[in-house]
Image (cartoon, grey):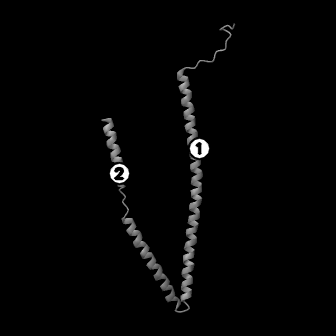
């Protein structure tokens, strides 16, 4: 027969201590998740930065391509006319391209609605819903 004085008793913890431990563990878990998210965001941002850098490089290479193609056309036209006229023809063609692109871009910009009607409407509905719930 065992004596109650010799039995090992588990330390008794209060409900407050248990809740405090759970809250501390939950807080630690949330901090770890936030740290993981930060790490993932940094990694993805670095990938995006590299991709943007490659696209910028491609843009510069494309720019040089257009310059050298324009020079090639100009020198090819030089065989049938004076170089000044050849250069003028190439410049006029690029002027026409620029005018068409500018006109198209202007037209597209006029179609943009900066008011964000749908978002504005849902925000108004949300505000109305909060008013009816609280009042």
Image: 122 above or below 92: above
Q: Position of residue 39 (x, y in %)?
A: 59, 47
Quadrant in the picture for residue 3: top right
Quadrant in the picture for residue 4: top right
Q: Horizontally, is 89 left or right of 49 in the view?
A: left
Mark 2 and mark 1 residues within 8 Å of each other at the beta carbon: no
Q: Position of residue 115 (x, y in %)?
A: 35, 56
Q: Position of residue 122 (x, y in %)?
A: 36, 48
Image: 99 above or below 30: below
Q: Where is residue 58 in the image (x, y as percent from the top left)?
A: 57, 68
| Secondary structure found at label 2 | helix
Quarter of the rendering occupied by the C terminus:
top left
Q: Which of 65 and 123 is in front in this view?
A: 123
- What is the crowding at mark 2: few (fewer than 14 residues within 10 Å), some, or many (at least 20)? few
Image: 100 above or below 74: above
- What is the crowding at mark 1: few (fewer than 14 residues within 10 Å), some, or many (at least 20)? few
Q: Name the residue under label 1.
A: 36
The residue shown at (59%, 44%) is 36
Q: Among all residues in the image, which is located at the extreme front?
A: 1
Quarter of the rendering occupied by the N terminus:
top right
| Secondary structure found at label 1 | helix
Image: 96 above or below 38: below
Q: Indicate which disc, 2 or 1, sits on the residue closer to the N terminus.
A: 1
Q: Name the residue under label 2.
A: 120
The residue shown at (37%, 64%) is 111
């Amino acid at each position: 027969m065992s004596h109650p004085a010799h039995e090992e008793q588990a330390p008794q913890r209060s409900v407050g201590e248990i809740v405090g431990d759970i809250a501390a563990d939950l807080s630690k878990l949330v901090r770890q998740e936030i740290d993981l998210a930060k790490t993932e965001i940094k990694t993805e941002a670095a990938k995006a930065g590299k991709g943007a850098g490659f696209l910028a490089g491609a843009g510069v290479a494309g720019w040089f391509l257009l310059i050298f193609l324009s020079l090639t056309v100009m020198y090819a036209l030089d065989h049938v006319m004076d170089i000044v006229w050849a250069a003028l023809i190439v410049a006029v063609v690029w002027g026409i391209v620029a005018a068409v692109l500018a006109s198209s871009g202007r037209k597209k910009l006029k179609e943009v609605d900066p008011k964000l009607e749908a978002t504005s409407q849902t925000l108004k509905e949300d505000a109305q819903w909060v008013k009816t719930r609280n009042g």
